[in-house]
Image (cartoon, rainbow, N blue to C red):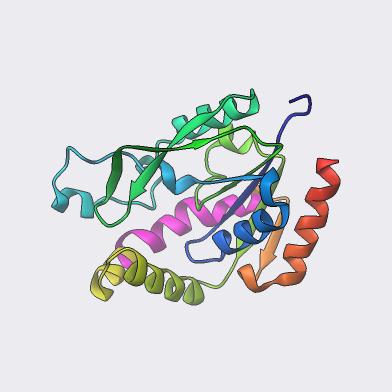
Amino acid sequence: MEKRPFILGIAGGTGSGKTTIAHKIKDYFNHNVVYIPHDRYYKDQSEKSMEERVKTNYDHPDALETDLFIKQLGDLLEGKTVEIPQYDFTNHTRKKGITTPVSPSPFIIIEGILIFHEPKLRDLMDLKVYVDVPADIRILRRTKRDIEERGRTLDSCYAQYVTYTRPMHEQFVEPTKEFADIIVPRGGKNEKAVTTLIHTIEKRLK
C-alpha cells in the first residue's frame, strides 16, 4: 500500500456507545475498513482459578496486553497480516489457540475505554474521538450488556462497578478526554455527529 493506513481511535467510558459508533462507521465504509476493539487484548488468565479471574480489575490498564496491540497495529501499517486474540468474557480468559486473522486495510478503527491512556498507542492514531455520556446512562447500558451477553449477575455488576469501574474511570479514562480531537455527546444515537465523522474521514482517506 502506497498510502499509510488511516487509524481512527474511539474512546470513552464503559457503556458510552463507542462500539455503536464504530460499527456505524465500519458499515458505511464496508470492505475498506477493519475494526479492532482493545478488549480483544485482555491478558490470558488460563493459569488462574476462576475465583482469581473474577477478581481481575478489567478497568485498569494492566489488565490489557497493550504492547501486543501496538505491535500488531504497527504490523498492519507495514502491510502485514496479523492474528489478533479472542477473549472469552464468560470464562474471563483468552480462547486458547483461537485468533482472528486481520489483513491490512486503508482504514483501521480501534476502540476501547483506555486507548488514549498509552502515549505510544495514542501516537498511532490519525483522529481521536471521545464519546461523552453521563455516568448513569453508561452504567445501565453496561449492566444490561454484561447480564445478557457475558453471563453476569446484577450483584456482580454492582460490585464490579463500585469497586473497579467507577474509580478506574475517574483515574484513567475521564482524564484522557483532553487528548481527543473530537468529543461526541449522547453516544451512538447522535446521528449528526456520526455523519460528521464519516465526512471528515472520507476527506482524509482521499
Q: Residue furthest front?
A: 31
**Quarter of image, res 148:** bottom left
Q: Position of residue 143 (x, y in %)?
A: 38, 72
Which of 112/102 is in front? 102
User: What secondary structure is the stretch in magenta mostly built from?
Assistant: helix
Name the residue: 49% across, 71% down.
Answer: 138
Drawn side of residue 195 relative to residue 8, left or right = right
Horizontal relation, residue 175 to residue 100: left or right? right
- Residue 79: name its quadrant: top right
Q: Is residue 76 above or below residue 201?
A: above
Residue 87 part of the magenta segment: no
Q: What span is in magenta? A: 162-178
- For the image, the number of numbered tags is 0
Q: In percent of the image, x 68 and y 57: which residue is there?
A: 25
In what quadrant of the picture does the C terminus appear?
Answer: top right
Q: Is residue 78 above or below residue 7?
A: above
Name the side, left or right, on which 136 lies relative to 29: left
Left or right of residue 23: residue 135? left
User: Which residue lies at the image location 24% right of the left edge and 53% below the top edge?
Assistant: 91
Residue at x 57% of width, y 60% of height? 18
Vertical placement of 105 versus 140: above or below?
Answer: above
Whether 167 is among the magenta residues is: yes
How far from the left and from the top, in percent, is residue 41? Answer: 41, 41
| Up/down of 65 relative to 155, above or below | above
User: Measured from the top left, where is residue 194 in percent x and y?
Assistant: 72, 63
Q: The N terminus is located in which quarter?
A: top right
